[in-house]
Image (spheres, rainbow, N blue to C red):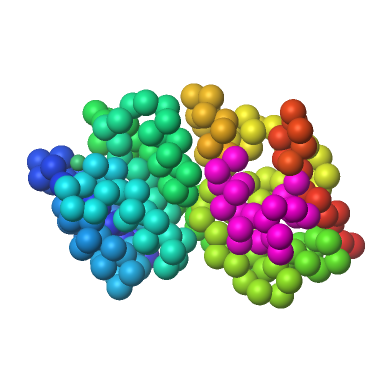
Amino acid sequence: MTATVLLVEDERKLRELVRSYLERAGFAVLSTGSGAEAINVATTARPDLIVLDLGLPDVPGEAVAREVRAANPTPILMLTAKSGEQDRIAGLELGADDYVTKPFSPRELILRVQAILRRNAPSAAAGSEASFGDGTLLIDESRRIVRVRGTEVELTPTEWGILVALTTVPGRVYSRFELINRVRGYDFEGYERTIDSHVKNLRRKIEEDPANPLIVQTVLGGGYRLGFSRDV
Ligand code: CA
């Protein structure tokens, strides 16, 4: 099945360049230079991934990401011209799954897009559910389904990756460095604090009281651990 990428970039030349690379890599591409149009297209066409420029003339990329994320957990790869760490972290706080700083190589961008989609893809294998905390948390890795207290929860690729990593060995403490490597599959230049933003978003979706988390627990000075044990 051909994956559809929504490309949002107001610089026409760059948009056309990235579009041609994406098409050559086999993606169906929808593109626009307008943030308002991007919000529309994202909610109606349901692309598999959004490549989103942070600096748009009408609606800022941050606002586009927020709107899109309010509707569904479409993976987002941010394009940013701002190279300051704060700006990068701000982008990831919105739940972006990765970012590329301009100027970037289109080949690198394609590799990142493919990596996010690969992480997000359900496998064809037969489903089997792992259960944690007396059935409070159910995870079907092959079908990429999470259910909490009986309700299916939609997670972004990064939120999913963190949760699955923590369930590998319940109770074991995973450092931010370890989590970011597990989730992204490569070193992330030490932006370990971005994990905290994703954990915050994850808790909002799965914890009854995100301020007093029972499932994803913080270990001071250590990292995070799953607060449940695996049911047998
Ligand atoms: Ca721009």
Q: Residue at x 89, y 62 (%)?
A: 232
Q: Quadrant of residue 230?
A: bottom right
**Residue visible at 85% across and 54% down in the picture:** 229
Give the percent coordinates (x, y) of residue 129: 73, 66
Q: Which residues are magenta?
A: 196-217
Q: Position of residue 52 (x, y in %)?
A: 30, 48
Q: Tell me: residue 110, above or below residue 160.
A: above
Q: Give ligand 1's quarter of the image.
A: top left
Instruction: Check the picture and name the quadrant holding the N terminus.
Output: bottom left
Q: Residue furthest front?
A: 211
Q: Quadrant of residue 177?
A: top right
Q: Is residue 103 magenta?
A: no
Q: Position of residue 71 (x, y in %)?
A: 42, 68
Residue at 53% over, 37% down: 194
Return the residue nearer the eye: 180 or 90.
Answer: 90
The answer to whether 161 appears left or right of 139 in the picture is left
